[in-house]
Image: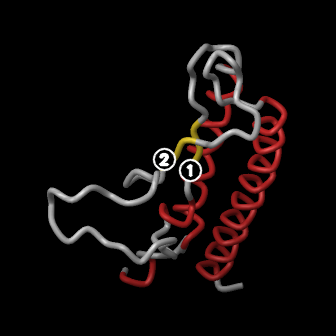
């Protein structure tokens, strides 16, 4: 059954990443009034291992990582207008991003649904 190993392609990973991002955006919105709360987001380029923004690489285990991202794609958002209490959540931006991400999540689920129905038709011989 080697043929079915990668049946969902990138969409399986994408739906998990989109779900995770929606959770982070929801946390940011919920903590919009929490002093010193730092808004978090996902770096999809790093998460999917596509491009590197800098050419520097760690060559020794004691060297520090370059860039603000962690290995799991989590980044802290730099605000345009930081609050006086240290909170970096910009509520309007977070709400807009949540809306966009929910539409992307729905689209990814639709791709998965189409893939599953295609496999069902193939198995039935249609």
At x 71%, y 53%, the residue is 105
The location of residue 83, given as percent across then percent down, is 71, 23
Image position of 99 (left or right of 12): right
Q: Is residue 56 above or below residue 110?
A: below
At x 70%, y 57%, the residue is 109
The location of residue 84, given as percent across then percent down, is 69, 18
Foreground pick, 34 / 20: 34
At x 71%, y 67%, the residue is 111
Q: Which residue is mark 2?
A: 74
Image position of 123 (left or right of 50): right
The quadrant of the picture occupied by the N terminus is: bottom left
* SS for callout 1: strand
The location of residue 64, given as percent across then percent down, is 27, 55
Q: Residues within 10 Å of mark 2 (few under 14, many from 20)?
A: some
Q: Which residue is mark 1?
A: 42
Q: In this view, which residue lies farthest toward the front?
A: 84
Q: Is residue 2 above or below residue 21?
A: below
Q: Which mark is residue 60?
A: none
Image position of 35 (left or right of 7): right
Quarter where residue 4 is shown: bottom left
Foreground pick, 44 / 55: 55
Q: Are marks 1 and 2 in contact (CB under 8 Å)?
A: yes
Tag 2 or tag 1, which sits nearer the N-term? 1
Q: CA distance from mark 1 to mark 2?
A: 5 Å
């Amino acid at each position: 059954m080697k043929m079915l190993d990668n049946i969902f392609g990138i969409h399986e990973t994408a739906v998990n990443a989109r779900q995770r991002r929606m959770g982070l955006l929801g946390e940011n919105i919920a903590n919009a009034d929490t002093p010193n709360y730092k808004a978090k987001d996902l770096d999809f380029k790093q998460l999917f291992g596509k491009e590197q923004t800098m050419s520097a690489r760690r060559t020794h285990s004691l060297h520090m990582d370059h860039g603000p991202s962690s290995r799991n794609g989590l980044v802290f958002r730099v605000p345009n207008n930081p609050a006086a209490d240290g909170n970096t959540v910009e509520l309007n931006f977070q709400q807009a991003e949540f809306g966009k991400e929910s539409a992307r999540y729905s689209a990814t689920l639709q791709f998965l649904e189409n893939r599953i129905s295609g496999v069902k038709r193939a198995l039935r011989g249609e």
